[in-house]
């Protein structure tokens, strides 16, 4: 079920295997939950049987003492059932919380292992919905519905078994009385999973539209696209409403039929029991006990059916969460070791799935330690070039290698030590300044952290914070503007210490003076390393060893700043325009 627009959804068999794997990971606790539930259900069987005994004892002429003794046993069994059920719920909830923790950890691990291109094609909304609403639904089921389902299933089975033990004919009669429930459940289950999957996909679409509209709010406003975004939002909300109404319809059919069906087996057992008693094959007490068992069956059976309905929703959510296991994975770190830092692009062409060809045959070699600036008008293919160099995308035709090894064949950890792409997009994580930096290098000490901040010109404003490196950032802490957040991102790059650094307009949010200082400081720190800068500010090109000019997906000029200015081509025209000179 993979499409270009959505992450995969796990098949029912995959979900069952995942559940089995989670249970096996904590099998001892699961076994204890089953045992306690069985004991609690067994203790609950004593009550109706003892009531039947009381009826027969009274009809046989027994006195108050016999009734009191049996009533005391009923009280003790009820107390035992209460304690056992409470213990079972306690153990079950702890088991559910541990399982939920494993689900969350596995989801995060799989998310981090996804190639960046896969996430971008799917859209952040789908991944966000799976990591929030779907994981929450699965967690509620594992914590609450799972233990309750086990407890009530055990009680229902024991109660039906008790009726069969009293008289197989009464048991068969009560079982046949539940045929209406069986029929409506079959009808419901055939429709529930597709309905809830559609509901989850509609929720993802809303999340995606809200996220992209908020992220591009300025662009939407500038281009007067508000009407289109509102229309798209309304379409998404309408689709969500339609899917939710459909699942609501399923429930409005299921629950009324179930509620009526509970009365059928009780009435059937009483009628058949009356006939059998009239024939002398059953006592009144046995008929009463069987009817009480059937009447009590409604409670756990109702809970079971309610939880089964909840399992359809959570099963669809679990399929979406577990679906990440079927998504493309990043290359494992068993790849070959690059012999050096030489970057080569040979005959590279690239086309997006829903667009034309962006790169039309690019040949480029970047020597180890070289600083290369890539310039050109918007839409020339500069960003696509940077993504191919960083291994985010694979070329449609041609090869991109570092040290003789294809970039896309490098495992995540090895690739991060070889090539790092820094874009205009940045993120400040909730936590302290120290936490934000240690993400790149967990073993770094304070001296290394301050050195990284100094190298990108961020040490001054960090020292002014109330607690320095320990100052909390984000919600509830110190606020950072765009330039400060970008400086933190660059400091993380310094700590990661890559061999090749690709800056895709990474200093776009900094003012010209700060940007120039940051770029020079960063270049000084990365002396001897390869730096490829994608930029509109041509002072970056002036400071580079070579300049590559991109136009219409082609590499049209390549040389030093002086050579290209002297050649009086496209770069020279850009340079004159940058300085306000007539073309």
Image: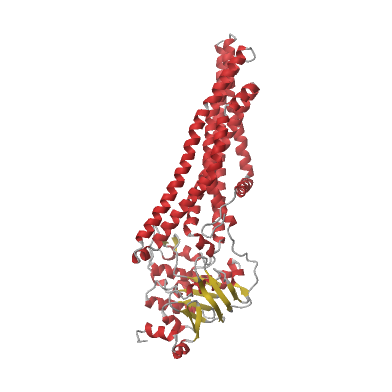
Image quadrant for the C terminus? bottom left
Residue 545 visible in the displayed image: no
Q: Say which of 41 and 220 sits in front.
A: 220
> Count of labels shown?
0
Residue displayed at 64% across by 22% down:
169
Furthest-front residue in this view? 356
Q: Say which of 450 and 414 sits in front.
A: 414
Residue displayed at 56% across by 10% down:
63
- Image quarter of residue 542: bottom left
Q: Position of residue 196 (x, y in %)?
A: 51, 46
Residue 271 position (above or below residue 581):
above
- Image quarter of residue 535: bottom left
Residue displayed at 57% across by 22% down:
268
> According to the image, what is the colour scheme of the structure?
secondary structure
Residue 364 position (above or below residue 495):
below
Residue 402 position (above or below residue 56):
below
552 lies left or right of 391: left
Q: Position of residue 354 (x, y in %)?
A: 50, 65
Residue 328 position (above or below residue 18):
below
Q: Say which of 366 and 190 sits in front.
A: 190
Q: Where is residue 576 in the image (x, y as percent from the top left)?
A: 38, 85
Image quadrant for the N terminus? bottom right
Q: Position of residue 295 (x, y in %)?
A: 54, 25
Furthest-top residue in this view? 61
Residue 543 visible in the displayed image: yes
């Amino acid at each position: 079920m993979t499409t270009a627009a959505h992450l995969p959804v796990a098949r029912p068999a995959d979900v069952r295997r995942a559940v089995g794997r989670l249970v096996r990971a904590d099998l001892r606790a699961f076994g204890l939950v089953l045992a306690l539930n069985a004991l609690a259900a067994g203790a609950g069987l004593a009550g109706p049987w003892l009531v039947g005994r009381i009826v027969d004892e009274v009809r046989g002429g027994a006195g108050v003492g016999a009734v009191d003794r049996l009533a005391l046993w009923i009280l003790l069994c009820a107390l035992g059932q209460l304690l056992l059920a409470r213990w079972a719920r306690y153990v079950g909830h702890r088991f559910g919380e541990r399982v939920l923790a494993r689900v969350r950890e596995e989801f995060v691990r799989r998310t981090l292992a996804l190639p960046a291109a896969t996430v971008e094609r799917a859209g952040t909304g789908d991944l966000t919905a799976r990591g929030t609403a779907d994981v929450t639904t699965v967690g509620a089921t594992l914590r609450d519905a799972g233990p309750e389902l086990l407890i009530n299933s055990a009680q229902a089975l024991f109660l039906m078994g008790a009726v069969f033990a009293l008289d197989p004919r009464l048991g068969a009669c009560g079982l046949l009385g539940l045929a209406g429930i069986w029929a409506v459940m079959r009808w419901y289950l055939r429709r529930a999973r597709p309905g809830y999957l559609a509901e989850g996909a509609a929720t993802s679409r809303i999340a995606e539209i809200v996220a992209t509209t908020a992220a591009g709010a300025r662009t939407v406003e500038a281009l007067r696209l508000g009407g289109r975004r509102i229309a798209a939002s309304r379409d998404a909300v309408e689709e969500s409403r339609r899917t939710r109404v459909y699942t609501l319809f399923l429930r409005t059919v299921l629950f009324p039929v179930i509620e009526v069906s509970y009365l059928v087996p009780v009435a059937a057992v009483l009628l058949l029991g009356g006939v059998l008693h009239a024939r002398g094959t059953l006592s009144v007490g046995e008929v009463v006990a069987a009817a009480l068992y059937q009447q009590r069956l409604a409670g756990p059976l109702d809970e079971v059916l309610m939880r089964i309905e909840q399992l359809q929703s959570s099963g669809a959510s679990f399929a979406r969460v577990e679906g990440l296991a079927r998504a493309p994975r990043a290359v494992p770190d068993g790849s070959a070791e690059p012999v050096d830092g030489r970057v080569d692009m040979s005959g590279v062409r690239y086309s997006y799935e829903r667009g034309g060809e962006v790169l039309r045959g690019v040949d480029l070699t970047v020597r180890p330690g070289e600083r290369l600036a890539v310039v050109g008008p918007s839409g020339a293919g500069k960003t696509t070039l940077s993504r191919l160099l960083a291994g985010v995308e694979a070329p449609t035709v041609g090869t991109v290698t570092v040290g003789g090894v294809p970039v896309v064949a490098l495992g995540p950890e090895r690739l991060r030590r070889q090539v790092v792409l820094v874009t205009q997009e940045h993120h400040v994580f909730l936590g302290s300044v120290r936490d934000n930096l240690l993400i790149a290098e967990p073993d770094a000490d304070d001296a290394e952290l301050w050195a990284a901040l100094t190298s990108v010109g961020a040490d001054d404003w960090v020292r002014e914070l109330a607690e320095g490196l320990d100052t909390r950032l984000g919600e509830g802490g110190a606020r950072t503007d765009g330039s400060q957040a970008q400086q933190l991102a660059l400091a993380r790059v310094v700590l990661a210490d890559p061999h090749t650094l690709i800056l895709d307009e990474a200093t776009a949010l900094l003012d010209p003076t700060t940007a120039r200082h940051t770029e020079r400081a960063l270049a000084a720190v990365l002396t001897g390393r390869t730096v490829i800068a994608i930029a509109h500010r041509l002072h970056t090109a002036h400071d580079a060893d070579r300049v590559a000019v991109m136009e219409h997906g082609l590499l049209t000029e390549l040389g030093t700043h002086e050579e290209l200015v002297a050649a009086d081509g496209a770069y020279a025209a850009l340079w004159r325009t940058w300085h306000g000179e007539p073309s």
